[in-house]
Image (tube, helix red, strand yellow):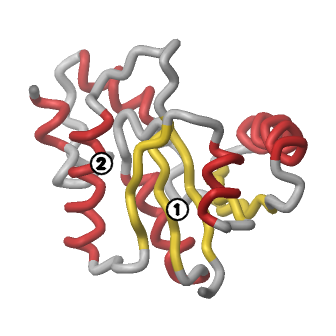
């Protein structure tokens, strides 16, 4: 079966920073699940199914063939258990991200003790979904910050 990992997030929207992390994970793991988490208490800016399609198009255009995109409405630690994955991928831009992720990792380890976290340092430390949405709301060009397949979702 090989080593599998999950890379969860809201990906609202999926950015070039996310793509950077996916590329790194895809080089190391045999299979990577990109898990779009859906939290019923939070309103998404972009529909999860449309974002999943855009991510799939992005992966295809980049020649990344060992990743699969799914939408999950439960706990990501449970998704990892269901898929038999022992690794969770997280991207870090700075020490604040690390501190936040370590707190989440502690909770996820209570749910799934076999889950190990693997951190990748992002090459795009300034890029975040929040930044992209804010710049776009002010009419700024965000084409340098998101994959080409994601850009049309922002224009709708």
| Element type at mark 1 | helix
State whether residue 102 is above or below residue 118. Answer: above
| Element type at mark 2 | helix
Q: Quadrant of residue 89?
A: bottom right
Q: Can you say which quadrant of the picture contains the N terminus?
A: bottom right
Sequence-earlier tag: 1 or 2: 1
| Tag shown at residue 21 | 1
Q: Quadrant of residue 68?
A: bottom left
| Closer-to-camera residue (142/73) | 73
In the image, what residue occupies the spot 42% across and 40% down? Answer: 11
Taking the image as shown, residue 24 lies to the left or right of residue 46, namely right
Q: Quadrant of residue 86?
A: bottom right
Taking the image as shown, residue 120 lies to the left or right of residue 60, namely right
* Residue occupying the far bottom of the picture: 2
Q: Position of residue 44 (x, y in %)?
A: 37, 22
Taking the image as shown, residue 69 lies to the left or right of residue 8, namely left
| Closer-to-camera residue (4/141) | 4
State whether residue 85 is above or below residue 140. Answer: below
| Tag shown at residue 138 | none
Q: Position of residue 67 (x, y in %)?
A: 42, 70
State whether residue 110 is above or below residue 136. Answer: below
Q: Nearer the viewer, mark 1 or mark 2?
A: 2
Q: Position of residue 108 (x, y in %)?
A: 80, 43
In the image, what residue occupies the spot 46% across and 71% down? Answer: 23
Crowd class of label 2 (few under 14; some 14 to 19; many from 20; radius 10 Å): many
Q: Position of residue 154 (x, y in %)?
A: 19, 31
Q: Can you say which quadrant of the picture contains the C terminus?
A: top left
In the image, what residue occupies the spot 17% across and 35% down? Answer: 153
Q: Which residue is mark 2?
A: 52
Real-space CA distance between mark 1 and mark 2, rounded to the nearest whole angstrom? 16 Å
């Amino acid at each position: 079966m090989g080593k599998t990992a999950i890379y969860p997030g809201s990906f609202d929207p999926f950015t070039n920073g996310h793509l950077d992390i996916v590329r790194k994970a895809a080089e190391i793991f045999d299979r990577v699940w990109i898990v779009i988490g859906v939290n019923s208490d939070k309103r998404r800016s972009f529909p999860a199914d449309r974002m999943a399609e855009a991510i799939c198009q992005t992966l295809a255009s980049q020649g990344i063939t060992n990743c699969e995109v799914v939408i999950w409405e439960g706990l990501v630690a449970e998704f990892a258990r269901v898929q038999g994955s022992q690794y969770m991928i997280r991207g870090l831009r700075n020490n604040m991200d690390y501190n936040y992720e370590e707190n989440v990792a502690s909770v996820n380890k209570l749910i799934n003790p076999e889950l190990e976290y693997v951190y990748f340092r992002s090459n795009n430390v300034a890029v975040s979904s929040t930044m992209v949405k804010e710049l776009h709301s002010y009419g700024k060009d965000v084409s340098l910050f998101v994959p080409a397949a994601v850009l049309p979702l922002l224009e709708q």
